[in-house]
Image (tube, rainbow, N blue to C red):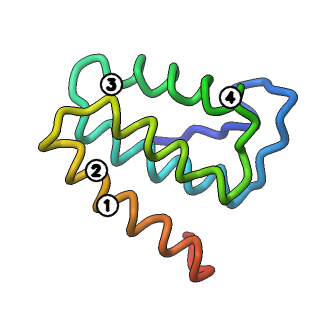
Amino acid sequence: MQRSASTTHPTPHKILPVVTRVIEQLDKVFLERSGAGGQARLELVFQRWLSSGKTSPSGLRHYVNALAEQLDERERKEFSVRAERILLHLQSGYVS
């Protein structure tokens, strides 16, 4: 899914390109797990995350947690494992 936080969603918050790339990866994983209605929930979580102002790389964990709360327990576990891998890549400097 191609979604650029800085261009798709006009916002006064500055989002780093690396954060945008990670969000796109997290969104893709979330949509794979969420089923019907996932896109609407994703947009709601994204807007709330933006409003919180925690848009730095360290704030991505808040985004992951908010997305995970939208899933049932089984899907939440799988999403959390995959999201953690994405965040670990960010921390190691290997974000694609």
Q: Residue furthest bottom?
A: 92
Q: Nearer the viewer, residue 95 or 13?
A: 13
Question: In the rendered structure, which amino acid carries the disc numbered 1?
Answer: Arg
Disc 1 crowd rating (10 Å Cα; few below 14, some 14-19, many 20+) is some
User: From mark 2 to mark 3, how far is it between C-alphas?
Assistant: 13 Å
Disc 3 crowd rating (10 Å Cα; few below 14, some 14-19, many 20+) is some
Mark 2 and mark 3 lie on one chain; the one further toward the N terminus is 3
Q: Nearer the viewer, residue 3 or 82?
A: 82
Q: Are marks 2 and 1 in contact (CB under 8 Å)?
A: yes
Mark 2 and mark 4 lie on one chain; the one further toward the N terminus is 4
Q: Are marks 4 and 3 in contact (CB under 8 Å)?
A: no
On the image, the x and y values in percent for residue 56 come to 73, 53
Say the numbered circle drawn on residue 82.
Answer: 1
In the rendered view, does 77 fall on the left or right side of 82? left
Q: Nearer the viewer, mark 2 or mark 3?
A: 2
According to the picture, the residue beneath numbered tag 4 turns out to be 8
Residue at x 57%, y 30% (from the top left corner):
46
Q: In this picture, is 56 found above or below 96?
A: above
Question: In the rendered structure, which amino acid carries the disc numbered 2?
Answer: Phe
